[in-house]
Amino acid sequence: GAPVSIQSMTNTRTSDAAATIRQIKRLEKAGCQIVRLAIRHRADALAVNKIKSKVSMPLEADIHFSHRLALLAIENGIDALRLNPGNINKRDHWAQVAHLASQKKIPIRVGVNAGSLSGKDAHLHRKPDSLTARQMVSSAAKYIRWLEKEGFYDINVSLKASTVMATMQAYRRLADVCDYPLHLGITAAGLMD
């Protein structure tokens, strides 16, 4: 009974606002309802404002490695964030983003990828599906708790592995731990060397 929204991601350089806008408009015609933009550099975050002025679809910033880019994307009008715990893993960084996102009423997706879990969880993609699923849920739960401790609850979660079975097992486990909306998808799907 929960609503389902279709999301895709651009494959343009976000800083190339004209190319990104063209691609977003094509995605919208194809039925996309939310579009995710890679925010890899300062120029990408600064382009958000220009892109937003030309499209009507909500934009989600895909943030890796730098919480500062998340803050800059928020300041430039992004509608939602996806943070990767595998490479933004300092609690005070999450707290800074949560406070500004809360002020601006911007949801945060805790986006766990099996292949980018940090520390002892690195190389998880080579482990059995059940172990991958368990460790992905454990990682997501840690970052969800961090956000909740900051009073932030506008959360959705993605748990992506390179196999359908690991991903399904992870989502089933997560459903027993929390009741946040889920973002479903597969990462790095296909044969791996």
Image: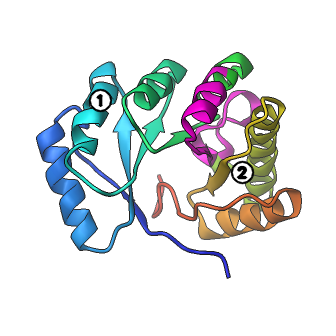
Question: Residue sitting at 41 percent across and 30 percent down?
Answer: 73
Question: Residue sitting at 28 percent across and 43 percent down?
Answer: 52
Q: Which mark is residue 44?
A: 1
Q: CA distance from mark 1 to mark 2?
A: 35 Å
Q: Amino acid at mark 2?
A: Lys
Query: Label 2's element?
Result: loop
Left or right of 38 on screen, residue 147:
right
Question: Residue sitting at 45 percent across and 44 percent down?
Answer: 79
How many numbered dots are placed on residues in this image? 2
Percent x, y of residue 175: 81, 64
Left or right of 70 on screen, residue 26:
left
Relative to the observer, which residue lies in front, 53 or 90? 53
In the rendered image, the residue lying farthest to the right is 176
Percent x, y of residue 25: 20, 60
Left or right of 128 on screen, residue 40:
left
Mark 2 highlights which residue? 127
Relative to the observer, which residue lies in front, 187 or 175? 175
Classify mark 1: residues with Cα within 10 Å, few (<14), some (14-19) or many (20+): many
Is residue 31 depicted above or below 190 in this figure?
below
Q: Amino acid at mark 1?
A: Asp
Quadrant of the rendered structure where residue 12 is? top left
Percent x, y of residue 23: 19, 55
Is residue 74 depicted above or below 107 in this figure?
above
In the rendered image, the residue lying farthest to the bottom is 1
Let me know if residue 115 is in the magenta part: yes
Percent x, y of residue 53: 23, 43
Residue 86 seen in render:
no
For the N terminus, give its image quadrant.
Answer: bottom right
Q: Which mark is residue 151?
A: none
| Residue extent of the magenta highlight | 96-124
